[in-house]
Amino acid sequence: MGKVHERIDGRLREFVEAQHVFFVATAPLAADGRVNVSPKGIDGTFVVVDEHTVAYLDLTASGAETIAHLRENGRITLMFCAFEGPPNVVRLHGRGRVVTIYDDEFADWAPRFTEQRGARAVIVVDVERVSDSCGYGVPLLDHVGERDLLPAHMDRKGVEGQAAYRRRKNRASIDGLPAFDDDPEPAPAAE
């Protein structure tokens, strides 16, 4: 039932680009560390760059597990499931890297995404293994629309509010690994 593919092209590319949600899985090196799985899928935040590279815009949110794990070991898997149409599951296994809003390279990546409110990084994945499987156990679901909650919430915070939020919530993973600790401390108030 499952098949390994040489690259992300043709129907596989069309499939992953058409999905409204995908899942990202990472884990720390420590055997007792927690495996993290995060849903992603805000429209305009995922791109297939080429046959062996994908990227997604990582938005400021309550945790930064993926960033912590990628900085420690780079391992990542993205999974796309067909919730409508013919059943299918596609997994992209690879090595990921973090391009933060403070990296010079971010300016080259950002224009690829139509949604950028609340951005903290781009996750770039060099895909080493592409596979699909039947997806017979995945239920049929109806996509009724986007939730414009997270981007709008972060947009209302503004640049400084987002940085303050990240300093408070994103500096370390739940296992204590350094995560998004890139935001500089604010300048002391003048007396």
Image (cartoon, grey):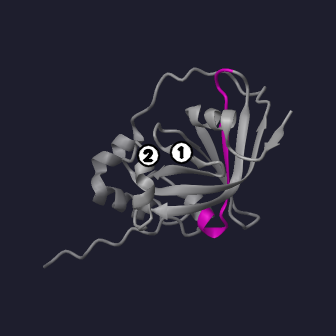
**Quick one: 2 or 151, which is closer to the camera?**
2
Which labelled disc corresponds to residue 47? 1
Inspect this view and state whether residue 80 appears. Answer: yes
Q: Amino acid at mark 2?
A: Phe
**Quick one: 178 or 174, which is closer to the camera?**
178
> What residue is rendered at 78% in x and 26% in y?
136
> What residue is rendered at 29% in x and 60% in y?
160
Residues rendered magenta in the picture: 70-85
**Quick one: 115 or 120, which is closer to the camera?**
115
Disc 1: CA contacts within 10 A as few (<14), some (14-19) or many (>=20): some
Residue 84 on the magenta segment: yes
**What separation in Å lies between label 2 and label 1 (alpha carbons)?**
8 Å
Determine which residue is flagged by label 2.
Answer: 113
> What residue is rendered at 36% in x and 47% in y?
117
Check contact, mark 2 vs mark 1: CB within 8 A: yes
x%, y% of residue 137?
Answer: 77, 27
